[in-house]
Image (cartoon, helix red, strand yellow):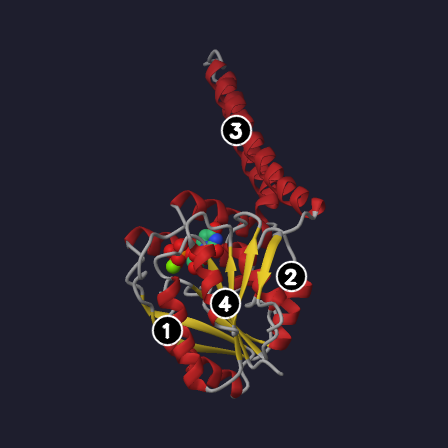
């Protein structure tokens, strides 16, 4: 039978919310009366999420569970979900009920009216504190400036894509450094928006530490922009002009008979130039690291077991 809706849910240590999520999502989906599959991607949870998911899958044939061999991260989990989704439209969401299943019918309606990519726009975001919202705004404004793209400030990992877009994402976007919410914004097709009110995380803690978010953002900027690599040219010109100014200054001093020892100038110039060089070598190193990861082309995730694969 044709599956109409696929829902992909990434799960990492979500034992406190899984049953509540499954209950709410299935009741919404059953009321909708369309065929669906609920794909839980268990990203190497170390709590009882795996056991809970097995029980859910045993009782509900619409639920599929993909168990990873270890923790590979949220991006890898979403890709695995895409790889195994069969629906005419595919929805990605979090397990913690921050993304309310109640809006699924509205999302599907948008899809049926011809939207290929539906971005869900948060109107209220109770969980993100001052720091998180400031840094997130800063991240997108830097990213937009250096990548020449226009990424949505409120883009999140809550979205719907049609089957044809899902296919493109899983076949053409198998990059190692992943940013799915960015990929969906550069493939084109008909795009739509739908507002929703984000809920508070039902229970448990956010899995993204500040450090992780920083690493992730930095990587996204590297993969979407070559600008840092070109920094060298502009910095070189700037430093060159500065050097010229110093040289002229020294010559004037010499003719005035005020020949200073020149020691300060040399120290300042040398440290300045070395600092520039190290920064640039560092930037090049970061790009090589990204390239190295791509070239190795290791698996983005490894599956240990799938439950209810073709039910
Ligand atoms: N998640 C995952 N793998 C990870 C970290 C998180 O699959 O390594 C899942 C997590 O279970 C949740 C979603 O990704 O369903 C988003 O994570 P979280 O809610 O912690 O992030 P936040 O909403 O705070 O940005
Ligand atoms: Mg969350």
Give the image location of residue 163, x and y in percent.
61, 76
Residue 173's disc number: 2
The 10 Å Cα crowd at callout 3, few under 14, some 14 to 19, many 20 or more, is few
Taking the image in four quarters, ligand 1 sits in the one at: bottom left
The 10 Å Cα crowd at callout 2, few under 14, some 14 to 19, many 20 or more, is some
Q: Name the mark nearer the viewer: 1 or 4.
A: 4
- Mark 4 lies on residue: 58
Q: Helix, strand or loop at disc 4?
A: helix
Q: Name the mark nearer the viewer: 2 or 3.
A: 2
Residue 275's disc number: 3
Q: What is the spatial separation of the Cα atoms under label 2 and label 3, in whole angstroms?
A: 37 Å
Given the current orientation, which residue lies at the most extreme top position?
Answer: 261
Marks 3 and 4: CB-CB under 8 Å?
no
Instruction: Tell me which numbered mark, 2 or 4, is placed earlier along the sequence.
Output: 4
Instruction: Tell me which numbered mark, 1 or 4, is placed earlier along the sequence.
Output: 1
Marks 2 and 1: CB-CB under 8 Å?
no
Q: Name the mark nearer the viewer: 2 or 4.
A: 4
Q: What is the spatial separation of the Cα atoms under label 1 and label 4, in whole angstroms?
A: 18 Å
Instruction: Tell me which numbered mark, 2 or 3, is placed earlier along the sequence.
Output: 2
Identify the residue at horizontal 48%, vertical 72% (top origin).
60
* Quarter containing the C terminus: bottom right
> In the depicted view, which residue is nearer to us: 276 or 188?
188
- Mark 1 lies on residue: 24
Marks 3 and 1: CB-CB under 8 Å?
no
Q: What is the spatial separation of the Cα atoms under label 3 and label 1, in whole angstroms?
A: 56 Å
Instruction: Tell me which numbered mark, 3 or 4, is placed earlier along the sequence.
Output: 4
- Inspect this view and state whether residue 130 appears: yes
């Amino acid at each position: 039978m044709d599956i109409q809706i696929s829902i992909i849910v990434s799960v990492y240590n979500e034992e406190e919310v899984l049953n509540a999520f499954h209950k709410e999502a299935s009741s919404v989906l059953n009321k909708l009366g369309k065929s669906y599959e609920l794909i839980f991607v268990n990203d190497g949870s170390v709590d009882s999420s795996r056991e809970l998911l097995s029980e859910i899958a045993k009782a509900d044939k619409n639920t599929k569970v993909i168990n990873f061999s270890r923790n590979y991260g949220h991006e890898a989990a979403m890709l695995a979900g895409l790889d195994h989704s069969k629906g005419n439209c595919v929805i990605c969401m979090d397990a913690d009920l921050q993304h309310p299943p109640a809006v699924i019918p509205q999302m599907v309606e948008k899809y049926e009216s011809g939207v290929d990519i539906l971005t869900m726009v948060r109107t209220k975001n109770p969980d993100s504190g001052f720091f998180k919202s400031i840094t997130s705004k800063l991240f997108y404004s830097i990213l937009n400036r250096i990548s020449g793209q226009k990424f949505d400030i409120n883009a999140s990992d809550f979205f719907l894509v049609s089957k044809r877009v899902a296919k493109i994402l899983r076949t053409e976007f198998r990059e190692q450094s992943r940013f799915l919410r960015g990929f969906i914004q550069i493939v084109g097709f008909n795009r739509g928006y739908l507002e929703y009110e984000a809920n508070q995380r039902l229970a448990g803690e956010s899995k993204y530490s500040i450090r992780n978010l920083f690493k992730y953002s930095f990587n996204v900027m590297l993969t979407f922009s070559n600008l840092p690599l070109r920094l060298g040219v502009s910095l070189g010109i700037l430093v060159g002009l500065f050097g010229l100014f110093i040289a002229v200054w020294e010559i004037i001093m010499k003719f005035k008979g005020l020949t200073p020892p020149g020691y300060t100038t040399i120290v300042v110039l040398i440290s300045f130039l070395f600092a520039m060089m190290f920064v640039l070598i560092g930037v090049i190193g970061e790009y090589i690291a990204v390239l190295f990861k791509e070239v190795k082309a290791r698996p983005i995730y490894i599956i240990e077991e799938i439950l209810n694969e073709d039910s």
